């Protein structure tokens, strides 16, 4: 079922993408949409304040021996939660990224669901060795 939803999304993108049909347009729009996600996240911190960032150097104990111990040292540096307004903006911007990712798949003859499944398989097979 999920593959049908993904395929249908990719088909809709194909039907809607008229103005920016060139590979150059799609690549630049994908980059722009990614930048807009970044900007929306930054605005949640700087304009709204629903999120704050507390970042400092991560200190790793010398006697750390397991991945679980490593995970306990990690911090996303985020404090707070997205307010409904910022969440809606970020969801829309991520949606735009998905739209142009699907458009790029269409132009290159790739199936978005297959790309997703390949990445899922790689992540689940390699586990922590898939550090990107």
Image (tube, rainbow, N blue to C red):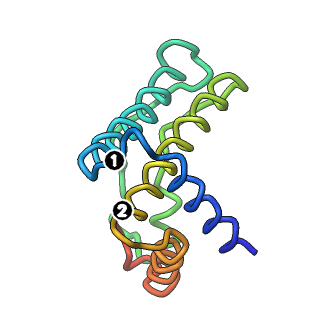
The residue closer to the viewer here, 130 or 115, is: 115
- Residue at horizontal 33 percent and vertical 65 percent from the top: 62
- Residue at horizontal 58 percent and vertical 14 percent from the top: 48
Look at the picture and state if 90 lies above or below 122.
above
- Residue 95 position in % (x across, y down): 56, 44
Question: Which SS class for mark 2?
Answer: helix
- Residue 14 position in % (x across, y down): 50, 56
- Residue at horizontal 57 percent and vertical 16 percent from the top: 49
- Residue at horizontal 61 percent and vertical 38 percent from the top: 91
Measure the C-alpha gap from mark 1 to mark 2.
9 Å
Look at the picture and state if 71 lies above or below 129.
above
- Residue 105 position in % (x across, y down): 41, 64
Question: Which SS class for mark 1?
Answer: helix
Quarter of the figure with residue 2: bottom right
The residue singled out by tag 2 in the image is 107
* Circle number at residue 26: 1
Quadrant the C terminus occupies: bottom left
Farthest residue in the top direction? 47
Farthest residue in the left direction? 24
The residue closer to the viewer here, 72 or 132, is: 132
Q: Are marks 1 and 2 in contact (CB under 8 Å)?
A: yes
Q: Is residue 33 left or right of residue 124?
A: left
Look at the picture and state if 82 lies above or below 45.
below
N-terminal of the two: label 1 or label 2?
1
Quadrant the N terminus occupies: bottom right
The residue closer to the viewer here, 54 or 49, is: 49
Farthest residue in the right direction? 1
* Circle number at residue 16: none
Q: Is residue 126 left or right of residue 84?
A: left
Quarter of the figure with residue 126: bottom left
């Amino acid at each position: 079922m999920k593959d049908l939803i993904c395929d249908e999304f990719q088909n809709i993108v194909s039907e809607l993408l008229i103005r920016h049909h060139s590979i150059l347009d799609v690549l630049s729009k994908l980059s722009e949409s990614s930048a807009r996600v970044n900007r929306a996240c930054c605005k949640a911190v700087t304009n709204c304040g629903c999120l704050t960032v507390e970042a400092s150097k991560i200190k790793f104990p010398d006697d750390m021996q397991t991945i679980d111990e490593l995970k306990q040292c990690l911090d996303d540096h985020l404090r707070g939660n997205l307010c409904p307004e910022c969440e809606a903006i970020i969801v829309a911007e991520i949606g735009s990224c998905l739209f142009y990712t699907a458009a790029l798949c269409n132009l290159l003859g790739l199936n978005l669901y297959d790309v997703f499944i390949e990445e899922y398989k790689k992540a689940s097979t390699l586990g922590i060795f898939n550090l990107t």
